Image (tube, rainbow, N blue to C red):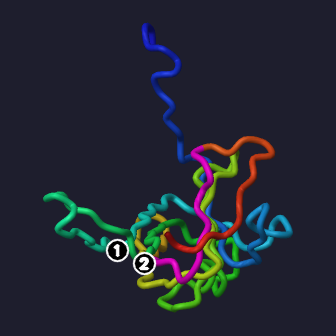
Amino acid sequence: MPGMPFSATRARSGKGGRILWGGTISANPPFSPPGDGLVLLMQEWSLTERADDLDSTGFEDQGTETGLTGVGVVEFTFRGLWDAGQNMLIDPPGIWPRPDGGPCVLYENLVDGVFWAFPCVRILSAQQTNPVRGLVTFSASCKSNGIWQRPNSNVAGPGYPLGNLVVSP
């Protein structure tokens, strides 16, 4: 845009996003060997990381609220297209309510390698839609089940250390 400094906007596109399901999670890259796990034909994923709010307000806080964060969890949903080129029993692979789903890696953008990794997820709900006119889709609502890895930065560059799995905050 004319008159707008280049540094004024740093928007990112989700068009390079991806979800890898199943396979083996390693430290770097998140799936090893390359190609291990199934790439889901995704249209969208959404994620919320949260923790319990533990109120620790006392007399010495002089009328202000203080607190700690307690048990952490990541909740996420995703939806995508049923891949007719895959065996119908494996795509989407094992996406039904269960406590031992995954492993799962959610890429913000495959180009720069920014991702969330979950060795195990709880699938709370799964839905399939089959319209007369349109595409067969699936969606799921999930929660982390134990440890997870969050992105170390907004954009990882070449050689950027992606870190180890971390315990919830």
Residue 92 within the segment the image draws in magenta: no
Q: Earlier in the sequence, mark 2 or mark 1?
A: 1
Residue shown at the point (45%, 69%) measured from the top left:
76
Q: What residue is disc 1 on?
A: 52
Q: How would you classify the magenta stretch by its main secondary structure?
A: loop
Q: What is the number of the mark on residue 108?
A: none
Q: Nearer the viewer, residue 150 or 69?
A: 69
Kind of residue sitting beneath label 1: Asp
Is disc 1 surrounded by few (<14), some (14 to 19) or many (20+) residues within 10 Å? few
Disc 2 + disc 1, Cβ < 8 Å: yes
Residue shown at the point (63%, 78%) measured from the top left:
91
Q: Secondary structure at mark 2?
A: strand
Which region of the structure is painted magenta?
A: 141-154
Q: Position of residue 51 (x, y in %)?
A: 39, 71
Q: CA distance from mark 2 to mark 1?
A: 6 Å
Kind of residue sitting beneath label 2: Val
Q: What residue is disc 2 on?
A: 71
Residue shown at the point (45%, 63%) measured from the top left:
47
Q: Quadrant of residue 18?
A: bottom right
Q: Quadrant of residue 37?
A: bottom right
User: Image check: 109 left or right of 8?
Assistant: right
Q: Residue furthest left?
A: 63
Q: Position of residue 19 (x, y in %)?
A: 62, 64
The image shows residue 161, relative to residue 3, as above or below, that is: below
Residue shown at the point (80%, 46%) measured from the top left:
159
Q: Quadrant of residue 134?
A: bottom left
Q: Nearer the viewer, residue 68 or 104?
A: 68
User: Image check: 62 left or right of 162?
Assistant: left
